Image (cartoon, rainbow, N blue to C red):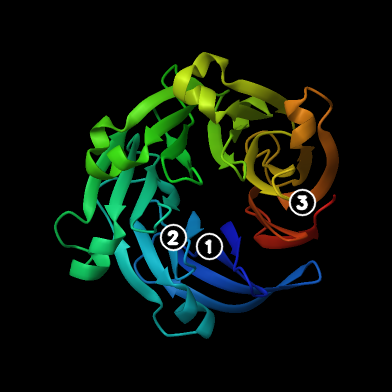
């Protein structure tokens, strides 16, 4: 079952994270993407992984971080993976937490932030130290930032100052968008929280506009895409709300394209109509911020479209329950 997919910039390749077998194992599938179609090139197992969930590329393009939910986060050499090297895994980051879903590198690629859904925390790892002293050496695991129930989505601001994290909520709490000071998170994680704001029910993903001035989140149980002004999140969180757009049932995956003008949202319907084909919603974000009708297109998808990514004029979506990765042209 494919969880996440990432196009590799400057190539016709993409990588999908896949959970296979019983008991479950994890693998990375290399895909060729051409003319709005995707085909399998190669598969590489992640030794010892109980699955493969979220992925993120380092800014320098050298490393791929792959979360595994129960076995921490694997760091993979992108060049070795694409070349078919026998073992592209360069190390594994663990700190005793569990439920790893999404990860994000700091702007300089020194640190990796990982959302721990089961542990209600954000883990912080010093990747530079891991490469220099070994992945199990002291202080590679910097610490954890305490958050609300079920942290999932992560985004780092373009200037590297802030980390945004979504929590689904639970135990009577609604979903939230959290703001963290990145520098504090890497030095004193327990003190990194600047604030948080309610963001619908079961808030699961966050993506920033190209300039970092708007944070867009999907609220799965509210069936909406929500936009927040990031400057207001720092000074007046109660006034940060800028847009609410109703999309399809139970939205999860989210990606921007065309310079941040449009968003494509994966409507998972994972609990209401599982195992049935679903859709993606295309939203004009300028219209959304102006309070106008913002839904401009619907795109057919498979069962449980989970994560979506864009590359130029093409989009990719993982259809989790259909066990497929779908390529499609992005409307403009």
The tag earlier along the polypeptide, 3 or 2, is 2
Q: Quadrant of the N terminus?
A: bottom right
66 vs 194, nearest the viewer: 194
Q: CA distance from mark 1 to mark 2?
A: 8 Å
246 vs 213, nearest the viewer: 213
SS assignment at label 1:
strand
Q: How many marks?
A: 3
- Residue 173 coordinates in the image, percent (x, y): 45, 19
CB under 8 Å between callouts 3 and 2? Answer: no
Disc on res. 66: 2
Dot 1 corresponds to which residue? 17
Q: CA distance from mark 3 to mark 2?
A: 24 Å
Q: In this orientation, does residue 70 appear?
A: no
6 vs 61, nearest the viewer: 61
Residue placed at 44% from the left, 16% from the top? 172
Category of crowding for the residue at label 3, using alpha-carbon neighbours closer than 10 angstroms: few (below 14), some (14–19), many (at least 20): many
Q: CA distance from mark 3 to mark 1?
A: 18 Å
CB under 8 Å between callouts 3 and 1? Answer: no
Q: In this orientation, does residue 309 appear?
A: yes
Relative to 96, 82 lies left or right: right
Dot 3 corresponds to which residue? 301
The tag earlier along the polypeptide, 3 or 1, is 1
- Residue 303 coordinates in the image, percent (x, y): 71, 49
- Residue 200 coordinates in the image, percent (x, y): 58, 23
Relative to 53, 130 lies left or right: left
* Between marks 1 and 2 in the image, the one whose residue lies nearer the viewer: 2
Category of crowding for the residue at label 2, using alpha-carbon neighbours closer than 10 angstroms: few (below 14), some (14–19), many (at least 20): many
SS assignment at label 2:
strand
CB under 8 Å between callouts 1 and 2? Answer: yes
The tag earlier along the polypeptide, 1 or 2, is 1
- Residue 239 coordinates in the image, percent (x, y): 56, 15
């Amino acid at each position: 079952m494919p969880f996440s997919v990432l196009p590799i910039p400057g190539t016709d390749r993409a990588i999908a994270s896949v959970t296979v077998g019983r008991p479950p194992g994890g693998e990375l599938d290399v895909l060729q993407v051409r003319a709005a179609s995707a085909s399998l090139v190669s598969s590489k197992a992640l030794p010892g992984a109980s699955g493969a969930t979220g992925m993120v590329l380092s800014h320098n393009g050298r490393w791929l971080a792959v979360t595994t939910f129960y076995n921490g986060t694997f760091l993979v050499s992108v060049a070795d993976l694409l070349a078919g090297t026998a073992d592209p895994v360069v190390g594994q980051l663990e700190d005793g937490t569990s439920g790893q879903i999404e990860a994000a590198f700091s702007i300089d690629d020194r640190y990796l932030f990982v959302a721990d859904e089961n542990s209600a925390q954000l883990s912080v790892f010093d990747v530079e130290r891991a490469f220099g002293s070994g992945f199990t050496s002291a202080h590679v695991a910097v610490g954890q930032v305490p958050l609300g129930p079920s942290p999932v989505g992560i985004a780092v601001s373009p200037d590297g100052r802030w980390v945004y994290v979504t929590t689904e909520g639970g135990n009577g709490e609604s979903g939230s968008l959290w703001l963290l000071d990145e520098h504090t998170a890497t030095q004193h994680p327990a003190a990194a929280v600047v604030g948080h704001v309610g963001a619908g029910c079961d808030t699961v993903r966050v993506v920033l506009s190209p300039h970092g001035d708007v944070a867009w989140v999907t609220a799965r149980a509210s069936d909406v895409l929500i936009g927040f002004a990031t400057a207001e999140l720092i000074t007046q969180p109660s006034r940060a709300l800028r847009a609410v757009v109703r999309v399809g049932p139970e939205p999860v995956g989210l990606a921007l394209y065309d310079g941040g003008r449009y968003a494509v949202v994966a409507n998972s319907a994972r609990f209401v109509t599982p195992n049935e084909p679903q859709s993606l919603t295309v939203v004009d974000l300028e219209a959304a911020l102006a309070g106008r009708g913002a839904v401009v297109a619907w795109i057919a998808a498979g069962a449980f479209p989970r994560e979506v990514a864009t590359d130029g004029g093409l989009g990719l979506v993982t259809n989790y329950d259909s066990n497929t990765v779908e390529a499609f042209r992005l409307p403009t």
